[in-house]
Image (spheres, rainbow, N blue to C red):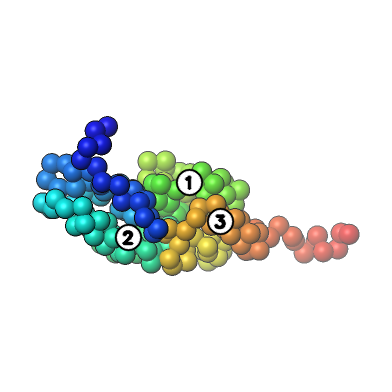
Amino acid sequence: MNTSNCIDLTNSDFEGFAKMCHGGWAFHGRFASHTGYRHYCISVNTIDAVKGIARNFFSQQKNYCYLVGQDHSEHGWKTIGVNYHKKIQVRLPAWASDCIKDTLNKCGLEESCSLNNFWEFPDQTDLSDARESIRPLLVKRTRFSNDDKLSEQLYQHYLTSPLGITTTQLDLFNP
């Protein structure tokens, strides 16, 4: 890749870069969007202006939860909902790390669409139980959280949620 027209945007809040392209700038990194990419049609040619645009993108998204959804009101997506197959599903950002995906697998979810990063709960899962079991991913301002820490929080919370508790009433009578 030709890096002569790339600007490194890494700072204390986010990392990524911008590259001049036809008709504007291509921004790459978590700050750009849930896909990690955003094209912005503008004829700006100063580094400070490009960095300012990146900061605006970051500011727009820093209050979002980790999951892709209702915070993206221009698309009307829900962070957790029921799909056409009557299964409860969530959508991860495209840049979600393997530790988050591995934890979702441990929590019983299965990836149903790798292209769009959709994950489904098992059949017959109650929506309120599903929501409670993954609550750490639904908390505002987790979009840019450390994935390792968030993954650990998710699993610990799942274990105490209705879907994670495996004790039955009969187990109480067996020592």
Contact, CB < 8 Å: mark 2 with mark 1?
no
Residue 3 is at least partly visible in this image: yes
Q: Nearer the viewer, residue 48 or 114?
A: 48
Residue 76 position in % (x across, y down): 30, 62
Determine the residue positioned at 66% across, 63% down: 160
Question: Along the polypeptide, which appears first: circle 3 or circle 2?
Answer: 2
Q: Amino acid at mark 3?
A: Lys
Q: Amino acid at mark 1?
A: Ser
Question: Along the polypeptide, which appears first: circle 1 or circle 3?
Answer: 1
Give me the C-alpha separation between circle 3 and circle 2: 21 Å
- Compared across the picture, whether 3 is left or right of 161 comes to left
Report the residue marked by disc 2. 58
Question: Would you call the spot at circle 1 few (<14 residues within 10 Å), some (14-19), or many (20 or more)?
Answer: some
Q: In the drawing, what numbered circle is on residue 149?
A: 3
- Residue 118 in the image: above or below residue 142: above
Report the residue marked by disc 1. 97
Residue 8 position in % (x across, y down): 30, 47
